[in-house]
Image (cartoon, helix red, strand yellow):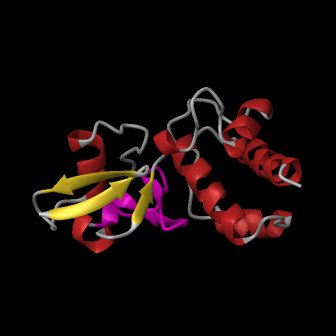
Amino acid sequence: MVTLTVNGEPHEAASPQRGLLSYLRFDLGLTGTKYGCGEGLCGACTVLVDGQPLRACLTTVGAVAGGNIETIEGLASDEDLHPVQAAFVAEQAMQCGYCIPGFIMGAVGLLHREPHPSPDQIREALAEHVCRCGAYIRIQRAIERAASDAS
């Protein structure tokens, strides 16, 4: 058995070799973390582990045992959206929405590291996220807004 902390709650996984994405979606019912490419290239499966973005599709539960895992479902508190989520809504930074949980988690990780990123830092941090709808400019504006609102 492996003990994991997901969104502040302890959970047990039977096998340390179980894929983290599969565990989150099928065992815990946290379907906000999406399966995209399965190769860690698109970012749809991004979660935070100890505040750092990580691709859940490439990670086993054993590799993150003891870490604090945060998914998109863990960002909002009660009825209040996380500031990054609120900025994405305000900037209409989504179209189909499939990739957005990964972008939001990547943005939260970026803002943990760099509270006031430059446009170049935002583009670099999210370069490995793919949005098939092409909402990149709105996504960048949302992250800039979240950083500005946090000031």
Q: In the picture, which quadrant includes the N terminus?
A: bottom left
* Of 15 and 78, the residue lying toward us: 78
Q: Which quarter of the picture shows residue 100?
A: top right
- Magenta span has 139? no
User: What residue is at 59 percent from the left and 50 percent from the top?
Assistant: 103
Residue 36: percent from left, percent from top: 39, 48
User: What residue is at 70 percent from the left and 69 percent from the top?
Assistant: 124
* Of 22 and 14, the residue lying toward us: 14
Establish if 2 lies above or below 10: below
Residue 42: percent from left, percent from top: 48, 56
Question: How many numbered dots are placed on residues in this image?
Answer: 0
Q: In the picture, which quadrant includes the C terminus?
A: bottom right
**Residue 148 visible here:** yes
Is residue 69 rendered to the left or right of residue 64? right
Establish if 17 lies above or below 145: below
In magenta, the rendered stretch is 38-59
Is residue 11 rendered to the left or right of residue 68? left
Establish if 7 lies above or below 123: above
Report the residue that reaches farthest toward the top. 79
**Residue 38 visible here:** no
User: What residue is at 56 percent from the left and 57 percent from the top?
Assistant: 129
Residue 148: percent from left, percent from top: 88, 52
- Magenta span has 40? yes
Is residue 68 rendered to the left or right of residue 77? left
Residue 74: percent from left, percent from top: 49, 44
